Image (cartoon, coloured by chain):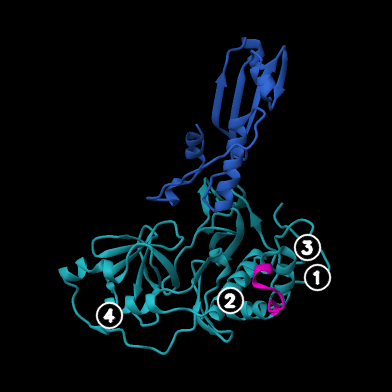
């Protein structure tokens, strides 16, 4: 009962398994066999291995505790679950929503097991001033970020209880506005060199490693932000054009179509899907047949 | 009861400082509610990627006029016999829930 092998006609290059509706499901032949386990399955009885994530030890056997694929790196065995919350690594770009304003820190929701933390000392003060944060800064915290704001940030470190510490110490991170957030499974966003993309169709895209995707209009030329109040005024006065709204809505549906087909999200796959979707109206992109059609090109990547 | 059942099955040391909420909504029922809830919750936890020791399988049993029955429905539950719900971890062969309501004669219980 160790390996599951499925036979068929189309060979998928990556060995991806399509989990669609039964009538649409295409069985795929896997070039390398995947060791799929469910909770309670014995992975090995060899005592030479170390247990990693997703496993537990009972006596001398290593058993799986989640349903997923077994990964082995030398002597380390771990099980990568198919769908789970985001587990952060240092250097990941994430998009999160501020939940709470606390003492010298903000609590951010990043779809992980525990809320992430954004320390007051980890943000860029407006105007790029470098100074020690004082008591006044603490009182002004709500003017920087308040509950409900969306931010893009990078994971600075991971605490011992697996919660993440974020920072926005770069001009490309910060508050996000005038756009649309799409949530997908974190496993669909792979780690790449850059997560910020300016798409030629006229929108900017941030692929958060935690599965939160931000689609917004193309940023206007960089303007130095002098103070917090000025920034807020600029954002509320900015009116996005109807054309931008359409592009953003279409991109959102394309991202959801790719997520529905369990295809990984890269800027290239999203662009191919967008190009394939031009023929349909943005509203039609939620229909299953249309989803299959527009993701067919992206599937070949 | 579902909470206690899953406390034995979930590996809580991997979910420190967090709370796991299990919500079960019964759409239609013909008896055997608790067993169905436990089975559904097991599948939901596996789908969510929460570390479990093993599957938690649950079934009910009862008695109707000298005939032992498994997976009793609403009518059989209403009959004046015992209603036994058992949940186990199949591979480790451990019982995590053993709930009996009603009373029965000893020889019936052993069968």
Q: Does the magenta stretch include residue A5?
A: no
Which residue bears the numbered disc 1? Answer: A10
Choose mark 3 or mark 4, whichever is in front: 4
Residue at image position (55%, 73%) is: A190
Numbered disc 2: what chain?
A: A
Q: Do labels 1 and 4 share a chain?
A: yes
Q: How crowded is mark 3: few (under 14 residues within 10 Å), some or many (20 or more)?
A: some
Report helix, strand or loop for mark 4. helix
Give the percent coordinates (x, y) of residue A272.
66, 80
Give the percent coordinates (x, y) of residue A232.
33, 75
Numbered disc 3: what chain?
A: A
| Disc 4/disc 2 C-alpha distance (Å) | 32 Å
Which residue bears the numbered disc 2? Answer: A246
Q: Are marks 1 and 2 on the same chain?
A: yes
Report helix, strand or loop for mark 1. loop
Q: Pointer 4 and pointer 2: residues touching (CB < 8 Å)?
A: no
Image colour for chain A is: cyan
Q: What stretch is highlighted in magenta?
A: A276-284
User: Which badge, 3 or 4, is on the more N-terminal residue?
Assistant: 3
Residue A62 drawn above or below residue B90: below
Relative placement, left or right, of A87 versus A67 is: left
| Disc 1/disc 4 C-alpha distance (Å) | 54 Å
Which residue bears the numbered disc 4? Answer: A126
| Disc 3/disc 2 C-alpha distance (Å) | 36 Å
Image colour for chain B is: blue
């Amino acid at each position: 009962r160790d390996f599951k092998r499925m036979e068929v006609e189309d060979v998928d290059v990556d060995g991806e398994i399509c989990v669609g509706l039964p009538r649409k499901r295409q069985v795929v032949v896997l070039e390398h066999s995947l060791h799929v386990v469910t909770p309670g399955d014995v992975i090995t009885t060899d005592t030479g291995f170390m247990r990693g994530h997703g496993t537990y030890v009972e006596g001398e056997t290593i058993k799986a505790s989640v349903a997923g694929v077994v990964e082995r790196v030398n002597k380390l065995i771990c099980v990568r679950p198919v769908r789970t919350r985001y587990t952060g690594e240092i250097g990941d770009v994430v998009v999160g929503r501020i939940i709470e304003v606390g003492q010298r820190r903000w609590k951010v929701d990043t779809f992980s097991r525990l809320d992430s933390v954004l320390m007051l000392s980890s943000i860029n003060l407006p105007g790029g001033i470098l100074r020690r944060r004082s008591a006044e800064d603490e009182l002004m915290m709500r003017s920087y970020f308040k509950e409900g704001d969306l931010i893009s940030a990078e994971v600075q470190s991971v605490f011992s209880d697996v919660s993440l510490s974020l920072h926005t110490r770069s001009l490309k991170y910060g508050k996000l506005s005038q756009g649309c957030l799409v949530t997908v499974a974190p496993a669909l966003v792979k780690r790449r060199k850059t997560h910020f993309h300016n798409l030629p169709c006229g929108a900017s895209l941030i692929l958060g490693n935690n599965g939160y995707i931000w689609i917004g209009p193309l940023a206007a030329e960089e303007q130095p932000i002098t103070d917090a109040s000025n920034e807020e005024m600029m954002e509320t006065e900015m009116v996005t054009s109807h054309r931008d709204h359409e592009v953003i809505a279409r991109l959102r549906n394309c991202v959801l179509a790719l997520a529905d087909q369990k295809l990984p999200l890269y800027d290239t796959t999203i662009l191919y899907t967008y190009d394939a979707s031009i023929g349909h109206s943005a509203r039609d992109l939620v229909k299953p047949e249309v989803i299959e059609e527009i993701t067919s090109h992206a599937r070949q990547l | 009861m579902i909470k206690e059942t899953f406390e034995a099955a979930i590996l809580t040391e991997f979910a420190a400082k967090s709370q796991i909420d299990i919500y079960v909504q019964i759409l239609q029922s013909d008896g055997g509610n608790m067993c169905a809830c436990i089975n559904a919750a097991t599948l939901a936890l596996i789908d969510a990627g929460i570390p479990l020791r093993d599957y938690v399988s649950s079934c009910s049993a009862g008695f109707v006029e000298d005939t032992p029955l498994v997976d009793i429905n609403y009518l059989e539950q209403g009959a004046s016999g015992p209603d036994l719900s058992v949940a186990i971890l199949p591979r480790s062969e451990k019982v995590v829930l053993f709930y009996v309501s009603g009373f029965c004669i000893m020889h019936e219980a052993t069968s």
